[in-house]
Image (cartoon, grey):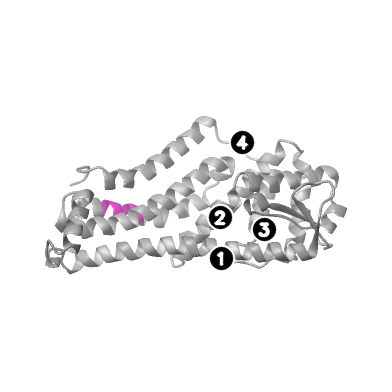
Amino acid sequence: MFWTSWFLAVLAVVLAWPVPVFLSRAAWPARAPFAAMVLWQSIALAGGLSMIGAMLCYGLVPLGDSLASGLRGLVRVFLGLESLDTLGFLHAFALSAAALLTAHLVFTLWLTYFRIHRQRSRHRDMLHLLSSPSSDRPDTLVISHQAPVAYCLPGGSRSVTVLSEGLLELLSPAELHAVLLHEETHLTQRHHLLLWAFAAWRSALPWLPTSKLAQQSVSSLIEIMADDVALRSVGKSTLVTAIALVASGAAQLPADKLVGGDSAAQIDTPATTSARLARLLAPSPALSRGMQALIVIAAVLLLAIPTALLLVPGILH
């Protein structure tokens, strides 16, 4: 397992720095948002698995020649059937680091969920005081605010789309339809779960610059995916106008911000809005289906590499 641990360590470093930087600067993700989203998820999962796996494999080297045999040896150490001296300081330290990192990632994931859930609950309570149900649109609330504001608030069966009176007065029926399609796509495709996962990654590893790049890229990609759904029913100029008008009122939205750039209600940043408008005003052709399929296959293989190295004995000795 010695060489396995070093290979996983190198893979973890590559996935933690150069790969995310390169992907965040690439132009093609806007031409294949779904494939890019799958790739970002694979990079995050494979990177975390490689970090933990590298330390775990190195720590178990004295106890066995595979993960299974090493874990059995570790159990014997815990039960007092084998001396702790078998491990040595460096190997014991590596195992402790792997355990601590795993616990840190799991706890941060739970803590981020709890924090977001609490803020959404507070936001929903505030909406009950400041808004009224739409008379002709189910699961839609209207707030008394003159700024053009639109966003969705996830919550399972309690999910709602929030519009302002100013938006309803400003947008044409077609533009309003585009906005509603966009926000409904966020809810039906469960984009908030992706935002939760990448917000947790950034909170868990704030010292890693690429965790911020990943979160920003994923936020932009889900907006692009929602725009693509809206474009199936409305014209490009209609959507461009709607995006620009909604963006002008987003800064006045009465919603609390969460740590790490996420919010109780997902709202565009100026950078994301600019990227969306640029993509619509100066469109590039979508990547071919074959190329998108290759990217998805590459993402699956990327995640399979550390998984196979950990679970299949004898790949690297």
Distance, label 2 to label 4, CA atoms, is 27 Å
Counting residues from the start of the chain, the first of labels 4 and 1 encountered is 1
Distance, label 3 to label 4, CA atoms, is 27 Å
Mark 3 or 4, closer to the camera:
3
Q: Residues within 10 Å of mark 4 (few under 14, many from 20)?
A: few
Residue 70's x, y, as percent?
19, 53
Counting residues from the start of the chain, the first of labels 3 and 4 encountered is 3
Q: Which residue is located at x 18 percent, y 62 percent?
A: 79
Counting residues from the start of the chain, the first of labels 2 and 3 encountered is 2
Mark 4 — residue? 285
Start and end of the magenta stretch?
A: 6-12
Mark 1 — residue? 115
Amino acid of disc 3: Ile
Q: Which residue is located at x 74 percent, y 36 percent?
A: 233
Distance, label 4 to label 1, CA atoms, is 40 Å
Find residue 267 and name its label. 3
Distance, label 2 to label 3, CA atoms, is 12 Å
Q: Which residue is located at x 64 percent, y 48 percent?
A: 187
Amino acid of disc 4: Pro
Counting residues from the start of the chain, the first of labels 2 and 4 encountered is 2
Counting residues from the start of the chain, the first of labels 1 and 3 encountered is 1
Residue 307's x, y, as percent?
33, 45
Q: Is residue 261 visible?
A: no
